[in-house]
């Protein structure tokens, strides 16, 4: 009970913190606070139209946030969510090109197959980074960042080359037939059942991390690699698995974007979703349920900021500022906490 | 003359120094003696200006030293030779000496000429320093010489040696004492922090004994004996006696000419033969860095012997492992008490259902362990980093003994613990022996080894020397 | 290939990487480098657009780079916060601020902002254009970069500050024992890194493109971080690595001119692929500073 209460307080404090920085950012950038907040409200939760946008944005944020969270918990600084997201899209689009467009009968298996392909795509990309680190000593941060850029050019190449639409006019893939896409709540809006998948995955990852032996080992490896070693936990294997899972989650985010919203891949397939997942994960305290909450909340902010951008010169980029400020504020608060609790030796 | 006047220092609730006074004279070697946790290191940190005492004063040549500003104390000529070297491993010997002589940020550095003076001193002391070799590649003894030369390269008037022999071989220690006497005869104040009686008796001119932060006594060395010093150090605490056992069971661990490689590919353990039977404690003594870690890790299975068949461990259960460095290898400090207890429990089928953990059961189980081993904590959810060292070690020990292992490998299980916690760990090891566990006790603490071990051998440069005669390897006999 | 043109491509990455080398030598890995370059680029373009002077623009870039470095150092060095987390946040912050200000202050319909470029040798000495055409595009930044790649190596090796900074990156305890403040050493190194990152950004706008566009850095900061490992923490080698990256970047223009049949994306990805491959071949035997990325707390 005490625990539930304290995490509830944490959530309220986090919410207040974000609102504080939101207002502060509006003021610093000379935006009318009242009107801007109203625009944020109208754009994110005022009606079903707004909710639809929020749901569409929170789905990838939750999943890439989970991806970052799982890897960071294992001590692997995966900054490569962006590349893994893209590879997820490429993976699904590639499988679509192989089976959906030639009308191979997969029936009800089509969607799961496309999503599996996206997870495989993301996992391949994170797996490369993990392999480079574990076998060749290439720093995870540097490796995953470089792979982000390589992914960016890879998708540009595929939509100008092997995966380009049949007409060969625009740099994009063919659009998926409506039948092959995820179920939407209604025809007019993009919101689809992908958001349920994200929520279920978040709960699943929470169970995996905190109620299974593998998840426990993952957390030990992240908290103290040397203690893991002394207790015969194979760190390298655990870190590899964590990275594969992390990449699969980011890939799934890309896959859900593909089969749920865009139906095709093109220039600007990912709008920094992989990158934005990192602050989402940090603000969620690297806890799957925290990430679920912070992903949902930032989904609202991003949806709201688009509404704001209609009447003002600025929009989405302001939310980056808010995200960064909140992350730094949390870092600052942690520092204080560390000061309050010094390590005391001796005394039985 | 360096005077300590009524100095007190607390860490939280712990009183590290309680109105300590002492006088250190030029041309004398002063030993500061005490058990682990007696306050020796705190006193030295105060002397060298690293710590500011809450009460009292340190007066050097008539003026108070600038507490809290070690750099200025250095300028006054107070130099500390740290137990943990302050050498940059990646630098050459020359560069390290130059670093100590560099005080201006905007200045040209020429390691060759800046290390010249220190190397001349080295030559005078009869030391040969390979100037262009990476420091990390030098033997520990040579590294310590560098550490001393760093201190000497200034105009050092006070030299504080913090447990300098802990990592030295007996010959190296003897050479160090020779150098200390030379430095003394040049009119410096030398302060030696130590906990080995034999060392103090052989090199010191004056001795000051600390016990639990209190200055128990100061006396010229000619006025004391080992017996007196031991009483001053330990007080009237009854020593723990154990009966050696002869009725041992079958061999559980058998090493037959085992060799093990260290991290840098060197042969850390060379062709050792021993067997540990059920119901005995086999003690491995020796100075740090003679293959202890590699031996322990080979026994636990973290390191492979060069020949696979040279080591046989017979047990159906997990091997219980108490690693040397609890904060590094024993615990994940950022995780909770429960999660740290679970490091062994995670393999326990009672606490799992397939791949899942039985969370409620685990909570119950960790409460039970906390109670049984009287770990002082707010509860299973408290983070381990906020516990005291003794309670941290209790977590390691309790999770090992909870699994009732048949083979236990314990490396310096009481290092840094106070007397009560030490008693606890020893009692646990003895009761495990009673129920028939085979225990390898790898320790640098001779008292601990002689108290607990049924058989004793010493590690020296990776080789094993058995029997009582090998005590000479430690450079000292048993204190009492 | 026009050598001076090639050097021009090299300069931004080289300057940033040289600054990052100093920072890493002191033990701080600055993941926020990309953000510092971007902020420097925007500040430089803005100041140059207002004043019409590329020099004032460059100074603005340098100052903003240093301000960001001080800000990030306050978290990572003074307070000992996680360097990757702070760096990531800094990148996001810079992306958000520059993007928002750019849209607010300049016509949002225009996607780029044109500014006066840094003058080159050809502008000062007209006869160079005719008699030494390959020297025409030489400018102060190119000379500065070449100078720094030698000078910084000397500073690290042969000055008191260099020795102290290296000890802070290898074994901070030793630096403190020698009477230096690790916090001050690392802050100083980080500030130099920030200044050079700001200059790198300034040159992107005022030296190469003559304009600013959103996210104009396009990952050069990350390439610069990779280059430090690539060049094994030696300024000369880091600069040489930057030259290779500059060459790879210039390949796309060459390919267009020569009409190669290679997909342009392959050429665009080359700097990243080659960086990664070099890191793979360097492998584990790197000369990385031992305390790199570890916050230092004075133990009491």
Image (spheres, grey):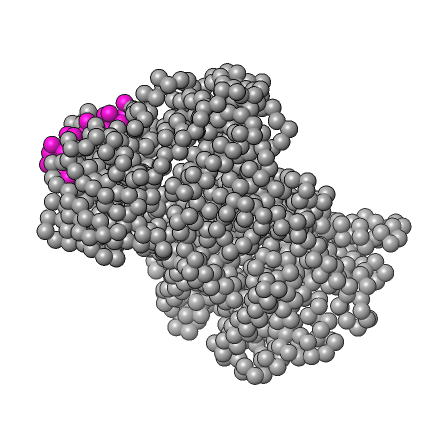
Q: Is residue C147 left or right of residue A153?
A: left
Whether A240 is drawn above or below B120: the answer is below
Q: Which residues are magenta?
A: B171-191
Front residue of A281/C34: it is A281
Asked whether the viewer can see residue C92, the reply is yes
x then y, percent, for residue C162: 30, 46
Residue lying at 53% horizontally and 80% vertically, measured from the top left: A31
Whether A36 is drawn above or below B414: the answer is below
Residue lying at 60% horizontally and 33% vertically, measured from the top left: B318
Residue lying at 62% horizontally and 31% vertically, measured from the top left: B317
Front residue of C65/B423: it is B423
Front residue of B128/B293: it is B293
Asked whether the viewer can see residue B132, the reply is no
Residue lying at 31% horizontally and 54% vertically, measured from the top left: B10
Q: Is residue A61 magenta?
A: no
Whether A164 is drawn above or below B131: the answer is below
Q: Is residue B190 magenta?
A: yes
x then y, percent, for residue A96: 80, 52
x then y, percent, for residue A284: 59, 61
Front residue of A335/B46: it is B46
x then y, percent, for residue B321: 53, 34
Decide whether the magenta segment is chiefly helix, strand or loop.
Answer: helix
Q: How many marks?
A: 0
Q: Is residue A106 left or right of residue B394?
A: right
Quadrant (top left/top right/bottom left/bottom right) for the N terminus of chain A: bottom right
């Amino acid at each position: 009970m005490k625990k539930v209460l304290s995490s509830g307080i944490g959530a309220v404090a986090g919410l207040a913190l974000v609102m504080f920085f939101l207002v502060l950012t509006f003021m610093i950038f000379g935006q009318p606070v009242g009107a801007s907040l109203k625009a944020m409200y109208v754009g994110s939760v005022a009606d079903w139209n707004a909710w639809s946008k929020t749901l569409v944005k929170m789905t990838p944020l939750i999943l890439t946030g989970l991806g970052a969270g799982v890897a960071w918990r294992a001590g692997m600084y995966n900054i490569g969510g962006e590349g893994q997201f893209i590879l997820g899209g490429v993976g699904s689009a590639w499988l679509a090109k192989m089976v959906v467009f030639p009308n191979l009968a997969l029936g009800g298996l089509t969607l799961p197959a496309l999503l599996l392909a996206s997870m495989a795509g993301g996992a391949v990309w994170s797996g490369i980074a993990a392999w480079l680190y574990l076998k060749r000593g290439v720093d995870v941060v540097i490796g995953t960042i470089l792979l982000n850029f390589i992914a960016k050019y890879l998708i540009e190449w595929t939509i100008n080359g092997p995966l380009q639409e049949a007409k060969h006019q625009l740099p994009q893939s063919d659009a998926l037939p409506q039948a092959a896409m995820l179920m939407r709540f209604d025809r007019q809006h993009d919101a689809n059942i992908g958001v349920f998948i994200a929520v279920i995955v978040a709960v699943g990852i929470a169970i995996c991390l905190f109620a299974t032996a593998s998840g426990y080992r993952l957390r030990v490896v992240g908290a103290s690699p040397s203690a893991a070693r002394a207790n015969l936990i194979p760190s390298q294997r655990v870190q590899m698995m964590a990275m594969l899972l992390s990449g699969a989650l980011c890939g799934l985010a890309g896959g859900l974007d593909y089969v749920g919203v865009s139906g095709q891949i093109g220039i600007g397939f990912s709008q920094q979703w992989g990158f934005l997942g990192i602050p989402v994960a940090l603000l969620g305290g690297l806890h799957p349920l925290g990430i679920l909450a912070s992903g949902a909340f930032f989904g609202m902010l991003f949806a709201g900021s688009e509404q704001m951008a209609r009447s003002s010169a600025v929009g989405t980029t302001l939310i980056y500022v808010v995200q960064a400020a909140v992350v730094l504020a949390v870092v600052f608060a942690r520092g204080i906490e560390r000061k309050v609790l010094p390590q005391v030796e001796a005394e039985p | 003359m360096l005077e300590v006047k009524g100095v007190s220092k607390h860490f939280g609730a712990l009183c590290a120094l309680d109105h300590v006074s002492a006088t250190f004279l030029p041309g004398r070697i002063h030993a500061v003696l005490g058990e682990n946790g007696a306050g020796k290191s705190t006193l030295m940190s105060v002397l060298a200006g690293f710590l500011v005492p809450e009460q009292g004063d340190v007066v050097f040549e008539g003026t108070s030293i600038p507490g809290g500003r070690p750099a200025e104390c250095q300028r006054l000529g107070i130099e500390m030779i740290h137990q943990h070297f302050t050498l940059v491993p990646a630098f050459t010997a020359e560069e390290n000496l130059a670093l100590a002589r560099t005080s201006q940020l905007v200045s040209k550095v020429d390691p060759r000429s800046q290390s010249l003076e220190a190397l001349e001193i080295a030559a005078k002391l009869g030391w040969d320093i390979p100037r262009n070799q990476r420091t990390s590649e030098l033997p520990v003894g040579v590294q310590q010489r560098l550490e001393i030369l760093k201190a000497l390269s200034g105009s050092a008037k006070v030299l504080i040696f913090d447990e300098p022999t802990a990592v030295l071989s007996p010959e190296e220690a003897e050479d160090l004492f020779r150098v200390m006497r030379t430095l003394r005869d040049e009119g410096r104040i030398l302060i030696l922090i130590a906990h080995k009686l034999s060392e103090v008796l052989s090199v010191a001119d004056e001795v000051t004994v600390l016990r639990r932060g209190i200055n128990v006594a100061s006396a010229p060395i000619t006025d004391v004996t080992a017996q007196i010093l031991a009483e001053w150090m330990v007080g009237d605490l009854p020593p723990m006696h154990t009966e050696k056992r002869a009725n041992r069971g079958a061999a559980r661990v058998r090493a037959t000419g085992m060799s093990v490689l260290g991290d840098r590919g060197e042969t850390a353990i060379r062709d050792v033969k021993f067997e540990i039977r059920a119901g005995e404690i086999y003690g491995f003594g020796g100075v740090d860095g003679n293959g202890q870690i590699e031996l322990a890790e080979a026994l636990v299975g973290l390191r492979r012997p060069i020949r696979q068949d040279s080591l046989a461990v017979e047990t159906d259960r997990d091997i219980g492992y108490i690693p040397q460095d609890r904060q590094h290898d024993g615990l994940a400090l950022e995780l909770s008490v429960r999660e740290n207890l679970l490091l062994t429990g995670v393999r326990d089928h009672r606490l799992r259902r397939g791949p899942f953990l039985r969370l409620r059961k685990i909570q119950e189980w960790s409460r039970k362990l906390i109670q049984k081993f009287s770990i002082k904590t707010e509860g299973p959810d408290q983070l381990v980093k906020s516990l005291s060292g003794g309670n941290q070690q209790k977590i390691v020990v309790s999770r090992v003994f909870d699994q009732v292992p048949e083979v236990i490998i314990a490396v310096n299980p009481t290092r840094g613990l106070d007397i009560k916690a030490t008693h606890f760990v020893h009692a646990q090891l003895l009761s495990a022996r009673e129920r028939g566990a085979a225990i390898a006790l790898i320790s640098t603490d001779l008292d601990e080894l002689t108290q607990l071990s049924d058989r004793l051998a010493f590690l020296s440069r990776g080789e094993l020397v058995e029997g009582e005669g090998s005590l000479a390897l430690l450079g000292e006999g048993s204190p009492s | 290939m026009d050598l001076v043109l090639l050097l021009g491509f090299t300069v931004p990455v080289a300057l940033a990487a040289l600054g990052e080398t100093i920072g890493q030598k002191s033990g701080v890995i600055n993941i926020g480098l990309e953000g510092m370059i971007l902020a420097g680029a925007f500040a430089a373009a803005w100041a140059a657009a207002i004043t019409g002077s590329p020099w004032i623009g460059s100074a603005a870039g340098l100052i903003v780079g240093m301000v960001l470095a001080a800000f990030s150092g306050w978290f990572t060095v003074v307070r000992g916060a996680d360097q990757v987390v702070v760096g990531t946040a800094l990148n996001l912050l810079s992306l958000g601020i520059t993007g928002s200000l750019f849209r607010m202050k300049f016509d949002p319909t225009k996607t780029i902002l044109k500014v006066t470029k840094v003058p080159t040798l050809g502008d000062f000495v007209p006869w160079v254009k005719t008699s030494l055409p390959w020297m025409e595009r030489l400018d102060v930044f190119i000379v500065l970069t070449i100078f720094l790649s030698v000078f910084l190596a000397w500073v690290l090796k042969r000055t008191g500050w260099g020795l102290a900074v290296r000890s802070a990156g290898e074994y901070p305890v030793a630096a403190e024992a020698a009477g230096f403040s690790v916090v001050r050493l690392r802050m100083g190194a980080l500030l130099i890194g920030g200044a050079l990152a700001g200059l790198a950004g300034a040159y992107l706008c005022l030296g190469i493109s003559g304009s600013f566009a959103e996210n104009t850095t396009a990952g050069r900061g990350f390439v610069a971080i990779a280059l430090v490992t690539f060049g094994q923490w030696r300024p000369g080698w880091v600069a040489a690595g930057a030259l290779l990256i500059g060459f790879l970047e210039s390949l796309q223009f060459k390919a267009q001119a020569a009409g190669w049949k290679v997909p342009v994306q392959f050429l665009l990805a080359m700097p990243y692929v080659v960086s990664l491959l070099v890191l793979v071949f360097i492998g584990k035997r790197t000369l990385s500073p031992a305390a790199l990325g570890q916050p230092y707390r004075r133990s009491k």
